[in-house]
Image (cartoon, helix red, strand yellow):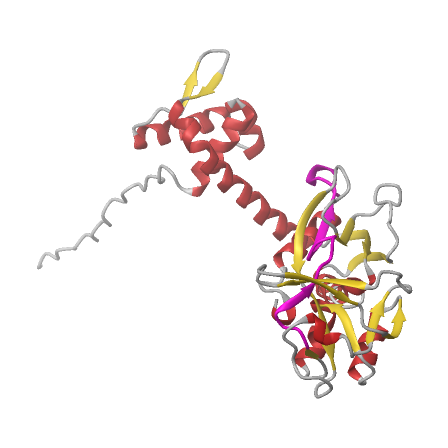
Amino acid sequence: MHSVNVMEPKKPPPRIAQRAPALDADALELFARVARAGSFSLAAQQVGQTRAAVSRRIAYMEQRTGQTLFLRTTRSLALTATGRRLLPHAVAVLDAAEQARGTLTSVRAGLAGSLRITSLPSFGTTVLPPLLLKFRELHPEVNYDLIISDRRVDLLREGVDIAFRVTNRPPPDWVARPYLRFHVGAWCAPGQWAPMQHPDELAPAPLLLLGPVSTNPEMHWVRRDGSDAVICARAPAAAQSDDLTVLVRLAEGGMGVVLAPSYCVQDAVAAGRLVELLPEWSLNIRQGNAVQLLTLPRPQLGAVARAFAKFVQDNAPTAAPAGL
């Protein structure tokens, strides 16, 4: 009988253990948690690990980088100078991770509740509705209570979550962030008047004015490049109203020149229904040239208000409307 040689199967090469990177995002996040908590035990509770596992991970970071990050005693834990320099970067990683997890959680679970918003009418009837419609697509369970008014709403007393105002002096204890910059210009239907070089040229043009009849016969104009300012006589009014939308429609129909914020006429300008008469000038508004987003400080905001404020900021215009 012939002997048969049985070939033994080749053994796979031994696997080389992969060592975790010393300063990846997970390590930096863990370092930030330990530094904030001032304790390995508390940080371990936050991440669902044992104290020993957290301590080993930090020790591994120190070993691989050759830098001591914490000064350890039996009773305390303190950052070294190197740890203090690293901390702001690690905290940024931790905050970004928490925000990302919060975003995914809100999308998965969905926000629900009510949101009370106040806005000046010129903004509330033009810019605000598209924002609400987009936010509604993300969070259909949110309900809205809208106060669209020129009156000075008491934000705290009336339980407002979000306010849009043109102001240089936001209420105390509220956080103001510029959302939309604009200028107040002179607009009319195409072909009525040729573009003007100076506000004095408005004198023969009938104006469409927002607000009650004014006893002030003067208008203060400034060049948009900041090089000049003039005071000129107010032209006669063809119409005055507390509703700017009406005045814009009248201007489109050729009734006169409307003085309006650029964000109120951007659609009409884009469609060719209005043109700007004084493209180098802006009517000076003492409250400023930006719509401010007003909220309470972040710790006092509810989840819905916090999500909407972030959504508004994320969708802020990259450029001012109508050529500002």
Q: Would you place residue 70 above or below residue 184 in this image?
A: above
Kindly identify the residue that appears in the image at 24 percent across and 50 percent down: 12
Task: Please say whether residue 258 is visible from this viewpoint.
Answer: yes
Q: Residue furthest right?
A: 213
Q: Residue furthest bottom?
A: 191
Reply yes or no: does residue 168 show up in magenta. no
Give the x, y percent position of residue 11.
Answer: 22, 49
Can you say which quadrant of the picture contains the N terminus?
A: bottom left
Q: Is residue 11 left or right of residue 31?
A: left
Residue 196's quadrant in the figure?
bottom right
Q: Would you place residue 89 above or below residue 53 in this image?
A: below
Kindly identify the residue that appears in the image at 38 percent across and 38 percent down: 23
- 211 or 227: which is nearer to us? 227
- 198 or 72: which is nearer to us? 198
Give the x, y percent position of residue 230.
Answer: 68, 62
Q: Would you place residue 34 above or below residue 157 in this image?
A: above
Q: Is residue 252 left or right of residue 324?
A: right
Give the x, y percent position of residue 264.
Answer: 74, 69
Residue 45's quadrant in the figure?
top right
Q: Residue furthest left?
A: 2
* Magenta segment: 277-301
Give the x, y percent position of residue 117.
Answer: 81, 54
Task: Please say whether residue 311 is visible from this viewpoint.
Answer: no
Reply yes or no: does residue 297 show up in magenta. yes
Kindly identify the residue that appears in the image at 69 percent across and 40 percent down: 298
Kindly identify the residue that appears in the image at 43 percent across and 37 percent down: 27
- 81 or 127: which is nearer to us? 127
Can you say which quadrant of the picture contains the C terminus?
A: bottom right
- 51 or 42: which is nearer to us? 42
